[in-house]
Image (cartoon, grey):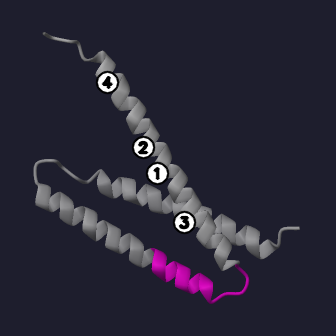
């Protein structure tokens, strides 16, 4: 039988992964292609802030006994990976549709 601490840990990990992916997408939406250096700075600062926040939350959760820490880690990495792969597939399929819509002007 699955323990309550494992279910809670998995739920927390899934929520953290979803929030991290959402935050990464919203930070990426701030980027304007006109200034490459500003875009790189926004991406880097956003990554550092997200990584720091996740580190603080994971450190806090590792100190508690009511949550299975391994389940949190599995939920976090699994959710973020699934969302990232889903976005990559949607992007790939969308670019294929755009290529079909472009007329061949020779």
Q: Which quadrant would residue 46 be assigned to in this image?
A: bottom left
Asked whether the residues under the numbered discs 2 and 1 touch, taking CB atoms below 8 Å apart as contact, a structural biologist would say yes
* Residue furthest right as drawn: 1
Task: Magenta stretch: give its range.
Answer: 54-67
Q: Secondary structure at mark 2?
A: helix
- Sequence-wise first label, 4 or 1: 1
**Could you tell whether 60 is left or right of 105 in the image?**
right
Residue 55 is marked as none
Query: Mark 3: few, some, or many residues within 10 Å (few <14, many ≥20)?
Result: many
- Sequence-wise first label, 4 or 3: 3
Depth check, mark 4 against mark 3: the one in front is 4
Q: Main secondary structure of the magenta part?
A: helix
- Sequence-wise first label, 2 or 3: 3
Q: Which residue is mark 4?
A: 98
User: Which residue sits at x=19%, y=58%?
Assistant: 39
Residue 84 is marked as 1
Residue 88 is marked as 2
Locate the C terminus by quadrant. Answer: top left
Inter-mark Cα distance, 4 to 1 = 21 Å
């Amino acid at each position: 039988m699955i323990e309550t601490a494992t279910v809670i840990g998995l739920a927390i990990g899934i929520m953290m992964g979803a929030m991290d992916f959402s935050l990464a997408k919203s930070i990426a939406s701030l980027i304007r292609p006109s200034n490459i250096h500003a875009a790189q700075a926004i991406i880097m600062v956003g990554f550092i802030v997200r990584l720091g926040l996740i580190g603080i939350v994971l450190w806090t959760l590792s100190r508690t006994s009511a949550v299975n820490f391994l389940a949190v880690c599995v939920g976090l990495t699994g959710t973020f990976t699934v969302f990232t792969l889903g976005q990559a597939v949607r992007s790939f399929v969308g670019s294929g549709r755009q290529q079909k819509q472009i007329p061949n002007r020779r």
